[in-house]
Amino acid sequence: MGNIVLLDELTINKIAAGEVIERPANVVKELVENSIDAGAKNIIIEVKNGGKTYIRITDNGKGMTIEDMPIAIERHATSKIRKIEDLENTYTMGFRGEALASIAAISKLTIQSKTKDMNCAVQMVVEAGDIIAQEETAGQTGTTITVEKIFFNTPVRYKFLKQDAIEFKYIKDLVQKIALANPDVAIKLINDGKNVFQTNGSGDIKDIVYTIYGKEIKENLVEVNYTHENIKVTGVVGNTLMANESRKNQIVFLNKRNIKNQIITNSADQAFKGGTGIGKYGFFILNLEMPADCYDVNVHPTKLEVRFKDEQQIYKAVYHAIKGALLNKEFLGNDENENNKTEYIENEYKFLTNYINNTNPNSVVYTQGMPKIELINRDNARKIDYKYIGILYRTFIVIQIENDLFLVDQHAAHERVLYEQIKENYKNNIKNNSQIMLIPEVVNLTNKEMEFVQNNIKMFKDYGFDIEIFGENSLKINGIPDLEYKIKIDTKDIFMNILDEMMTKERTSIKDIEERFIATVACKAAVKANMDLTPSEVHNLLDRLLKLKNPYTCPHGRPTTIKLLSFNPEDHNIIKK
């Protein structure tokens, strides 16, 4: 007798259930998604003991007929598709026909359902995959599914479940994501008899954000609405104040299905660069809408992973959507739209994705004696009529705009101006962008420092450092980036400060190194707190800041301006300008 045998149906179903149902949260996910597919606009989720002993999902969807109910718990039974080709035109959350069969195989399952054409509801009880009862009962149009004693017949899986509070946290996080993807569906979550989460189905995602994250987050959101060919990106992104050191507030949906995709994550990181601060991640909740034949979610039973046919198109669409939203904000009370924002974003996109060709014959080049070009400027500076009040704590420039007072961080503002200038010098392949020293300086480096400089010497030179190897571990500095330095700078000090910063936070990606390098040079060269500025220097700084398309933060994410207060001049002893 051979060693290979065919497994019985119950064993097969138990094994298959493990791919779909790992914990109570998976049960909630599959059932709630079925409710949404059924057109439900009101869904109630009730759980007890973290979902281990009791889960009930009640919806007002279209319901199931008495003929469909027994078939619904069979493996690969579905109303969503008929043949493999249908996957290219399927937008429902489920389509494999595995969820109910998997749940029924490892629990006691009760289904009560009614369509609008049925006179009464039908209730069916299933235990370990077997139908043990079916009868007519009273009920409203829609479906109620109760799952009890999860994993009662697979004790090995049950013992790997976490404490009730942890299992409920998984459920709550899942339900909140489903609510964010479906703001037009009213969802209520009840845990051990207590209402812990509820949405009103208004269709406004900001209402749900307010419920989940609070008022402060909601007030710092920027709406996203961008279309590129057959891809539409909608949702919200947090402004630069919402940056975080983890990715916990980055949520992506594909046609309302929560997914994880590295292409989208990388694109978002690039879009937030220069605004959230190095090492921090932006806040976003995005939904990508596109034809079903542009992607494949049939990679894993959980449908969390997805593959795109054109990854570059997805990357570009997400980048433009986020970047455009971040730039579509008011600045010092001025909310006029950018005339050629798309051109600027495309320029930034090419730079950050290594598409810039420095040998382009159309690149701007200037030589000694020629005037420098205007850098990354708007068509016209923002029209803001401000009154310069003074400088607070030798750090914050105070200006009055109509009935509002604003603080301008002199260091952050100057840092942003220099950051854009250095980057534009590089992008335009501007030559002779070094400030030559009267007397070159020689610095001695450690082996590790010398290795870093040698590996990145082209980057140092491209961004304005005129340096050359001068011995085994020595470097001669002939010049530093040609920027207007506020005070006399020690050439050696600025170079070593930048090198130290780069060495401390070195990354593997060359683009990340370059981005950090630009930000560090700008930071070290900008005016600092406690440096005195003359009124003419203040006006010059503000005028240059107002010309930038992206003046909102320094490259490390610190806001350049803060609204201090609003006042009524008639109620205060303040002279109107």
Image (spheres, helix red, strand yellow):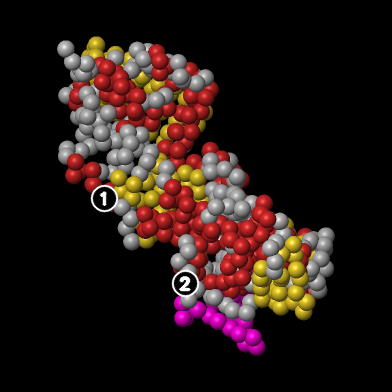
Looking at the rendered image, the quarter that the C terminus falls into is: bottom right
What residue is rendered at 18% in x and 44% in y? 85
Marks 1 and 2, how far apart in space? 34 Å
Type of amino acid at the residue the image marks with label 2: Asn
**Residue 56, located in which quarter of the rendered image?**
top left
Which residue corresponds to mark 2? Answer: 357
Label annotation for residue 293: 1
> In the rendered image of this protein, does residue 444 appear above or below residue 476?
above
- Is residue 377 inside the magenta stretch? yes
Label 1: how many Cα within 10 Å (few below 14, some 14–19, many 20+)? some
Q: Nearer the viewer, residue 485 or 548?
A: 485
What residue is rendered at 53% in x and 55% in y? 509
Q: Are marks 1 and 2 in contact (CB under 8 Å)?
A: no
> In the rendered view, does 209 fall on the left or right side of 502?
left
Find the magenta span and give its range: 360-385
Q: Nearer the viewer, residue 428 or 62?
A: 428
